[in-house]
Image: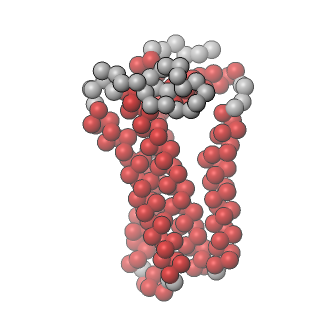
């Protein structure tokens, strides 16, 4: 049974749900970013080779990009507060969160590759990093994507929420084409 709520109430709930998700991701990003920022100051960092330095820089930049994208919806909200732009806010925050998770995946895999390379050697590290990337892609992408296509009637509300996040303006022009830009609201 679908929830009975106005479009405004749905957008408020979707944005609140998204902020809760971002709080979880933000903690992980901040811890990883802090760890990566301290690495060059450790005694052993001077012995890393060129490959490890490049992996480190990619991990550091990906963690910084993830932090920026995961924190961006808060800044976006501040800039649009009381401007009647909730549909655009929910649409953009959804995109920023997705991008932030993508950068977080890259940062985590690179951090695993870097540490594994130092501890286990290059070949084993590459295998461990590929398995890690596959594990994250499965948990964060494949399983949710497979679940999204289920026909479970108990998930009607969740499906409605996903459609609202992908199409916060509530129009039908994005029915099967994925997320579209929301219509301007004044």
Q: Nearer the viewer, residue 6 or 55?
A: 55
| Residue 45 on image: x %, y % | 45, 81
Residue sitting at x 48%, y 14%: 5
Tell me how many marks there are. Answer: 0
- Residue located 67% across and 50% down the image: 138
Q: Residue drawn 60% across and 77% down?
A: 117
**Which image quarter holds the N terminus?**
top right
Q: Quadrant of residue 119?
A: bottom right
Left or right of residue 128: residue 23: left
Question: Residue 184 occupies which quadrant of the picture?
Answer: top left
User: In the image, residue 31 lies at what x, y percent?
Assistant: 44, 59
Which quarter of the rendered picture does the C terminus lie within? top left
**Taking 11 as reference, is 39 above or below it?**
below
In this view, 152 is above or below 119: above
User: Left or right: where does residue 79 sit relative to residue 27?
Assistant: left
Residue 17 shows in this picture: yes
* Front position in the image: 107 or 54: 54
Question: Where residue 162 sits: x, y (%)?
Answer: 56, 29
In the rendered image, the residue lying farthest to the right is: 151
Figure colour scheme: secondary structure
Q: From where the camera sits, is residue 31 visible?
A: no
| Residue visible at 53% across and 67% down in the picture | 111
Q: Nearer the viewer, residue 5 or 94?
A: 94
Q: Quadrant of residue 147?
A: top right
The location of residue 8, given as percent across then percent down, is: 41, 19
């Amino acid at each position: 049974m679908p929830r009975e709520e106005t479009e405004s109430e749905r957008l408020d709930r979707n944005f609140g749900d998204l902020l809760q998700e971002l709080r979880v991701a933000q903690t992980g990003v901040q811890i990883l970013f802090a760890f990566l920022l301290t690495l060059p100051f450790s005694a052993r960092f001077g012995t890393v080779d060129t490959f490890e330095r490049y992996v480190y820089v990619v991990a550091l930049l990906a963690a910084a990009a993830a932090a920026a994208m995961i924190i961006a919806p808060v800044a976006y909200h501040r800039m649009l507060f009381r401007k009647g732009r909730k549909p655009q806010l929910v649409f953009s925050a959804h995109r920023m969160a997705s991008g932030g998770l993508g950068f977080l995946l890259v940062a985590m895999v690179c951090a695993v590759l870097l540490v594994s390379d130092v501890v286990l050697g290059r070949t084993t590290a590459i295998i461990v990093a590929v398995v890690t990337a596959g594990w994250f892609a499965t948990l964060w992408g494949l399983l949710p994507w497979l679940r999204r296509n289920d026909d479970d009637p108990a998930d009607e509300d969740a499906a409605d929420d996903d459609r609202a996040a992908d199409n916060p303006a509530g129009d039908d022009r994005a029915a099967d084409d994925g997320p579209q830009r929301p219509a301007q609201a004044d």
